Amino acid sequence: MPFYDAIPEDWLEPGCSATVSVDGMPVAIANVDGSYFAFQSLCPHQGTTLGGRPVVDGHIECSQHSSRYEVTTGRCVQASIPDGFNQNLMTFPTRVIDGVVQVQI
Ligand code: FES
């Protein structure tokens, strides 16, 4: 599968995330201490947007029901409050080429 340009490397500060379009598909990207990780943009519980949420100690928390995910692996480390839903995030490989973060989808 090919890598696609996503964002300039200096566009996303450490501890931040964003939803971007990668070859027309919405993908969330997080900067964890200068490394970039890509994952599905919508929470698998009920579809709340994850991109744009802060990244704390490598984790992102859904604003809706507090599911928490490890962005480096996609692992759900805290289930949703109301029903214990704990599905992991789908993740995508990334690389940086000539100052551009690329995502493989
Ligand atoms: S929509 Fe994300 S935890 Fe419910």
Image: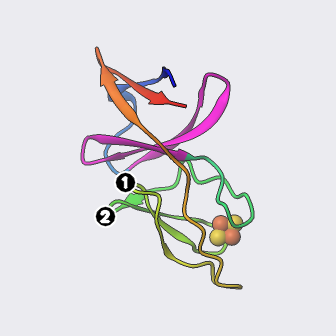
**x, y percentage for residue 68?**
50, 70
Q: Which residue is outermost to the right?
A: 46
Which residue is tagged 2? 57
Q: Is residue 64 visible?
A: no
Residue 9 horizontal side relative to residue 41, left or right: left
Q: Which residue is at the front of the view, 60 or 52?
A: 60
Secondary structure character of the magenta stretch overall: strand
Which residue is tagged 1? 72
Residue beneath the point at 55% across and 64% down: 88
Q: Could you say whether the residue bearing mark 2 is in a helix, strand or loop?
A: loop
**x, y percentage for residue 64?**
67, 69
In the rendered structure, which amino acid carries the disc numbered 2? Asp
Residue 25 horizontal side relative to residue 91, left or right: right
In the rendered structure, which amino acid carries the disc numbered 1? Thr
Question: Neighbour class for label 2 at 10 Å: few (<14), some, many (≥20)?
Answer: few
Q: Give the mark toward the camera: 1 or 2.
A: 1
Bounds of the magenta span?
Answer: 16-39
Residue beneath the point at 41% across and 48% down: 16
> Which quadrant of the view contains residue 82?
bottom right
Q: Which residue is at the front of the view, 9 or 44?
A: 44
